[in-house]
Amino acid sequence: MKILLYSPDNGVTKNFMPHLWMFLLQSLTPAGHEVVLIDGNAQPMDEAGIAQYVRKNNIGLVGIGCMTRMIAKAYRMADAVRAVGVPVVMGGPHVTEMPDEALGRISGKRHADAVALGEADETWPRIVADAERGQLKETYAPVDEFGQERKPSLQAYPAIPWNSLDLEQFNVVPKFAGAMLKRFRDGWGTFRIIPVESGRGCPYGCEFCTVTGFFGDSIRFRTNKSVVDELLLLKARAKSESGQIAVFFIDDNFAINPKRTKSLLRDIIAANAQVHWIAQISANLLRDEELVDLIAAAGGKWIFIGMESIDATNLADVNKGFNKPGEYAAVLQRLADRNVFAITSFMFGMDNDTVGVAERTLEQIRTWPAGLPIFGLITPLPATPLYARLEAAGRLTRPKHWEEFIPFAMAHTPLKMSIAEAHAEVKYGWAQTYSPEAIAHAVRSFSHKPLAYRINILVARLCFRGIYFPQMGPMAWVKVLGENAQTICDIVKECFRDWLTGMCKQPARSATVGTSGD
Ligand code: B12
Ligand code: SF4
């Protein structure tokens, strides 16, 4: 049977990173089937397009997975596939929380023949076998022989064949530039960000988060060896293509068990498996100096920190009181001292937020080492304690907000400001942080560091700007590059000077962000 795994586009950004579930299920598919992957962020497709693709390629089963924000598109695509007589199975966080919606049991249309609840590592082979026999069941749940929920162990994690997979759709270096860039420094012919998981689960139970409910508070890890082998494979592939690879450790909290994280990082270093990587770690766990030393030595470059708010009352309200705003500066400085920087994520519209929250947050951010601040709105995702609380209080203004996804729009009324005011705060945060002046300032703040760090922060800021300000087409990029022309010119001049110096003093080289293991 030929199986298509499809992930709908998020409508906001392009293919900066593929989704892990597709590669994982591909690797877990029993032998004898062919699995093709289409990521809508890399290969945009509409309803007619997917129907035509499925017919033309004789697809026998389509698997669709996505987050809540893409579910409306996912349902439309599923409807188009089912209309041509091909069964659809849906999985991922949204349909796990709302299976009856996908199966048309609440009201309205049925979108999926079957729904995979929760983690599908063990149910996927069964789904494929049932589909082949034309006997798909409506729901597949990860349960043991007694019907009790069973979270898959990650000890026997499948080897994803990163060395042989077709990853062209996820190469962010444009084809026309690739041939030339292959010869630049250690080779930049390709650049991909690859998702890797080392473990699952987070017990912290923040009120707005689906993770504790979905993956459970039982934390599971892969073996160090399996993670190290995967990194070595990715590193070898990048080298063979004269390209670069970076890894996003998608664990919800990469250092949730610091002892185990340290042991993994030590093994990465010992095996010389360092690639540049990003990971999500909560601020409280970054108090540990030894951990931060190891992060830097093992290739860690960017840490995503869910700071959410600088207001302790807000944090307590959402059960995230373990975040201590008073220590944010020290945590970020500890990272920056080792050349590790932070993506700091904030949510506005929280219950204790009042007008001016963005500027108050920015006042703090400006005193921290430059990084990548991002701003969103607190969103009641289905099946979260936050959703239940707001529903009970009658505060949901769009209880089924996912039926019409609107980026950066609230779905409930904040307590101390209006919805419009909350939207304005988010806009202010983005506009101030990603203005040409702010970008120039961030780049200048790295002037005591090698040039590569200035290039890194410039490119990262220009890309991150696109999360809020649409930057999808070439014209949008031309505009952004034009607005930041002065900073870009300064960097290009520096690159040229650096290159000339290098030519004169061969073989001296400066540190390069993007090459492995510096
Ligand atoms: C990596 C990640 C991202 C990446 C992007 C995704 C990518 N390219 O990988 C980044 C950092 C950009 C991101 C951003 C956001 N994310 Co995110 N992200 C994750 C994270 C940490 C890991 C995803 C992952 O790969 N998991 C590991 C795989 C193996 O698990 P999985 O995807 O769930 O797949 C398993 C099952 O669900 C199932 N399955 C999944 N799909 C399918 C399909 C079929 C057919 C079948 C059979 C089974 C199946 O099988 C898999 C194996 O068991 C998750 C949390 C988590 N731990 O999952 C949050 C998570 C998915 N993100 C979430 C959210 C809310 C967001 C944002 C909206 C946050 C924000 N406010 O901006 C943005 C939206 C970005 C966008 N524009 O789309 C929520 C989604 C909740 C929901 N109900 O939708 C999650 C669950 C975290 C949370 N806090 O609750 N995210
Ligand atoms: S620490 Fe992060 S992953 Fe864990 S429950 Fe809180 S928001 Fe979710």
Image (cartoon, rainbow, N blue to C red):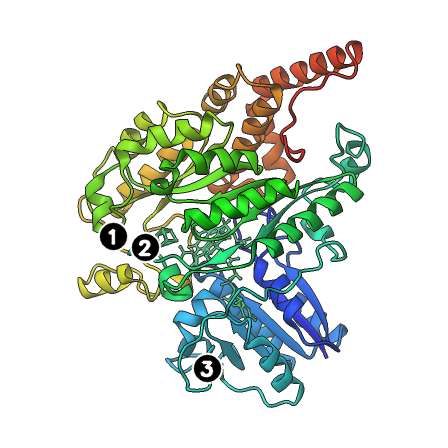
Quarter holding residue 417 = top left
Residue 236 circle label: none
In this rendering, the answer to whether 398 lies above or below 478 is: below
Identify the element where label 2 is drawn.
loop
Which quadrant is home to the C terminus?
top right
- The residue at the point 38 percent across, 25 percent down is 368
Q: Nearer the viewer, residue 319 or 189?
A: 319
| Mark 1, other Cα within 10 Å: few <14 / some 14–19 / many ≥20 | some
How packed mark 3 is, by other alpha carbons closer than 10 Å (few <14, some 14-19, many 20 or more), is: few
Tell me residue 226's x, y (percent): 62, 57
Could you tell me which residue is drawn at 46 percent across and 86 percent down?
A: 145
| Residue at the spot of label 1 | 319
Q: Is the residue indicated by label 2 positioned so its CB lies within 8 Å of ligand 2?
A: yes
Question: Would residue 417 be visible to someone looking at this image?
Answer: no
Q: Residues within 10 Å of mark 2 (few under 14, many from 20)?
A: some
Instruction: Return the x and y of residue 188 as percentages of the image width and height.
Output: 73, 35
In percent of width and height, residue 288 lies at: 38, 37
The answer to whether any part of residue 142 appears in the image is yes
Kind of residue indicated by mark 3: Asp
**Mark linked to residue 144:** 3
Secondary structure of the residue carrying numbered label 3 = loop
Q: Are marks 1 and 2 in contact (CB under 8 Å)?
A: yes
Tell me which numbered mark, 1 or 2, is placed earlier along the sequence: 2
Identify the image quadrant of residue 8. bottom right
Q: In the figure, 229 relative to 502: above or below?
A: below
- Asked whether disc 3 touches disc 1, contact meaning CB atoms under 8 Å apart, the reply is no
Give the CA separation, mark 1 to mark 2: 8 Å
The answer to whether residue 97 is left or right of residue 77 is left
For marks 1 and 2, give the one nearer the viewer. 2
Quarter containing the N terminus:
bottom right
